[in-house]
Image: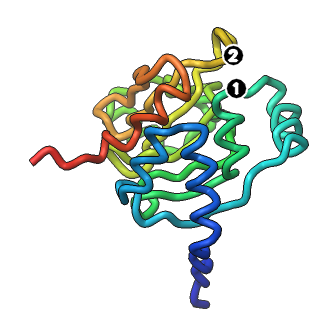
Amino acid sequence: MAARNKPDPPTPATVTVMLGAISEQFPNFGASLRAGRGDPIEQVSGPATLDDIDAIEKRLAIPLPESYKRLLGCSSGFWLLGGCVKFQYPFFHDFPPLEQLTPIQRQTLDAKGGIWPPPTQAMLCFADFFWEADGDQVLFDVKSGLAEGEYPIVYYAHESCSPEARRVARRFDEWIEDCLSAFVDED
């Protein structure tokens, strides 16, 4: 089996530029990152251009929230806390019909007492967010459309006894300013 190459870490200059841009747009989040609350900062991608953002919106066939577009203008993706938080280009949760699940998938669904499709069907995922379990995510609840240029933010706890989606913020800019507090040790 061939060894997997780990991508090179971002240069200090790349991180500095990203932190400066994020601090301008999201001061509390930027201060948290500068204080080391997101370390290590990895997999930093450059900022998305306006053309990049337009292309994402065309591919998704919906507008992105204004505050999220500001984040994309700082960086089109990055990882925090050793990969516990992974900002990425957004994609829709699109689960197959129940009858297409494998027998093992059906057994898992029955054991958890969950509903199918999961409650995040047709929501727009923008980050992995391993707050309660690996594989959890944060999403835009796009079902009701934009309200004042924003969508509500939902946390998807897929490992709950019955997977659940719960609203954690009214809008992206509110969520990102405080998102790292979820990982603070309260000992």
Mark 1, other Cα within 10 Å: few <14 / some 14–19 / many ≥20 = some
Per the image, label 1 sits on a secondary structure element best described as helix
**Residue found 59% across the figure and 42% down from its top:** 24
Tell me the kind of residue under disc 1: Glu
Outermost residue toward the bottom?
A: 2
Tell me the kind of residue under disc 2: Gly
Residue 7: quadrant of the picture? bottom right
Residue 12: quadrant of the picture? bottom right
Q: Observer-nearest residue: 36 or 165? A: 36
Q: Is residue 36 above or below residue 165?
A: below
Q: Is residue 61 left or right of residue 164?
A: right
Q: In whole angstroms, how far apart are the C-alphas of marks 2 and 1?
A: 6 Å
Per the image, label 2 sits on a secondary structure element best described as loop
**Residue found 9% across the figure and 48% down from its top:** 187
Q: Which mark is residue 97?
A: none
- Badges 2 and 1: C-beta atoms under 8 Å apart? yes
Q: Is residue 133 left or right of residue 138?
A: left
Residue tagged 1: 66
Mark 2, other Cα within 10 Å: few <14 / some 14–19 / many ≥20 = few
**Residue found 57% across the figure and 76% down from its top:** 9
| Figure label count | 2
Q: Observer-nearest residue: 113 or 119? A: 119
Residue 62 placement (x, y as % from top left): 79, 23
Residue tagged 2: 149
Q: Earlier in the sequence, mark 2 or mark 1?
A: 1
